[in-house]
Image: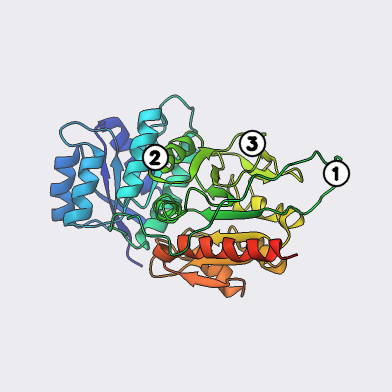
């Protein structure tokens, strides 16, 4: 099998060598060239025709975002961003993912100490995913909501004895995503109305230092409130809670969010399954599970439990998924109630909330 051809773009000669050496250690890839900035990269992409590009965010003459825009507009190719773990680097990374980058890898530098071996393993894994990824270059757009839902008065909550699980009367939405997820999440969350009478949990596979910037970006474009989850947050309607990078997120019987750093599940932390599997005993059939684009099968077990409990399960279709592995795992196990393109998922979630609310209110 032919090796995938990689172009490495970074303004630092040292980093170009470090990244090139990391990639060259894996027999699946061949580094066909390096570029020192965006202008150099654009010329070499045109001339060398790489299969995938690693692109630094911060560069002179033409930075990573400007370069990425031109790549997507003129010569689309899968791109993995190399991002510093600083606030400005994280913000720029979220913009890059919205512009069409397949994924990103934190650079082995910055305010958070990163293990070189971990960075190499993550880079290789994401490069392999990127080679087979669909490039989504159409900018996410706001879509009208087909149905209007009136937000009910907030229920009065009473403390429960420790250890007692009483199923909630609230509806809860839980969304899992991985590679290509930030862009897909923008599309879905922009479709949710601000008076949505359900809380939303989001588990996006992402390292520490980046999920807060993702939450802030989504909060700016959404009608619902979006925040990075904190330990002790009480799940409320009309609020989206993003699991922080490197933390599993669960919900207690009192509907309080708990964050923990127990071992990774399905090789990831946060894990979608960890969150989903805590919910059926609390919410019973008042759950809506959603799996968006991503590698692997994280979330498949959780979606099975949600469906078994009488909830609604929705997955992104193959055509609009950057990577179809996670949705496919749910479909192949027979646990997907709806298989939909990304621009219809938000509306389907809103409709499902309405139906589940009617079911609850009629009891």
In the shown orientation, is residue 69 left or right of residue 4?
Answer: left
Disc 1 or 2, which lies upstream in sequence? 1
In the displayed structure, 344 sits above or below 11; it is: below
Q: Can the viewer see residue 272? A: yes
Q: Residue at x 66, y 62 (%)?
A: 301
Q: Secondary structure at mark 2?
A: helix
Seen from the viewer's position, the closer of residues 278 and 109 is: 278
Residue 27 showing in the rendered view: no
Residue at 40 percent across and 55 percent down: it is 187
- Is disc 3 surrounded by few (<14), some (14 to 19) or many (20+) residues within 10 Å? some
- Counting from the top left corner in percent of width and height, residue 285 is at 70, 63
Label 2: which residue?
220
Of callouts 3 and 1, the N-terminal one: 1
- Mark 1: give few (<14), some (14-19) or many (20+) Cα within 10 Å: few
How far is disc 3 from disc 1 in space, using C-alphas? 19 Å
Label 3 element class: loop
Q: Is residue 259 above or below residue 153?
A: above
- Residue carrying label 1: 163
Decide if residue 237 is on the left or right side of residue 277.
Answer: left
Question: Residue 154: x percent and y percent?
Answer: 65, 44
What x and y, as percent, mark residue 242?
54, 43
Residue corresponding to mark 3: 233
Residue 251, above or below 322:
above
């Amino acid at each position: 099998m032919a090796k995938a051809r990689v172009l490495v773009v970074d303004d630092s000669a040292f980093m170009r060598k470090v990244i090139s050496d990391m990639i060259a250690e894996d027999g699946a890839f061949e580094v066909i060239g390096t570029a020192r900035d965006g202008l150099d990269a654009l010329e070499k992409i045109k001339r060398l025709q790489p299969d995938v590009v690693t692109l630094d965010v911060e560069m002179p003459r033409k930075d990573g975002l400007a370069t990425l825009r031109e790549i997507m507009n003129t010569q689309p190719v899968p791109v993995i961003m190399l991002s510093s773990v600083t606030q400005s680097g994280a913000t720029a990374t979220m913009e890059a993912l919205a512009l069409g980058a397949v994924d990103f890898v934190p650079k082995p530098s910055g305010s958070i100490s990163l293990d070189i071996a971990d960075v190499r393993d993550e880079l290789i894994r994401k490069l392999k995913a990127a080679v087979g990824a669909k490039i989504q270059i159409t900018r996410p757009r706001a879509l009208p909501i087909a149905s209007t839902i009136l937000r009910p008065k907030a229920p009065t909550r009473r403390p429960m004895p420790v250890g007692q699980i009483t199923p909630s009367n609230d509806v809860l939405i839980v969304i899992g995503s991985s590679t290509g997820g930030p862009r897909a999440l923008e599309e879905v969350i922009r479709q949710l109305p601000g008076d949505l009478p359900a809380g939303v949990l989001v588990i996006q596979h992402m390292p520490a230092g980046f999920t807060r910037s993702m939450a802030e970006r989504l909060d700016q474009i959404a009608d619902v409130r979006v925040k990075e989850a904190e330990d002790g947050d009480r799940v409320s309607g009309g609020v989206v809670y993003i699991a922080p990078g490197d933390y599993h997120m669960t919900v207690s019987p009192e509907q309080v969010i708990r964050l923990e750093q127990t071992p990774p599940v399905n090789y990831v932390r946060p894990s979608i399954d960890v969150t989903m599997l805590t919910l059926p005993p609390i919410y019973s059939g008042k759950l809506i599970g959603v799996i968006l684009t991503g590698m692997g099968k994280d979330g498949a077990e959780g979606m099975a439990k949600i469906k078994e409990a009488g909830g609604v399960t929705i997955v992104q279709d193959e055509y609009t998924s950057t990577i179809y592995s996670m949705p496919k795992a749910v479909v192949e196990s027979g646990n997907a109630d709806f298989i939909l393109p990304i621009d219809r998922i938000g509306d389907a979630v809103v409709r499902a909330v309405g139906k589940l609310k009617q079911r609850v209110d009629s009891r």
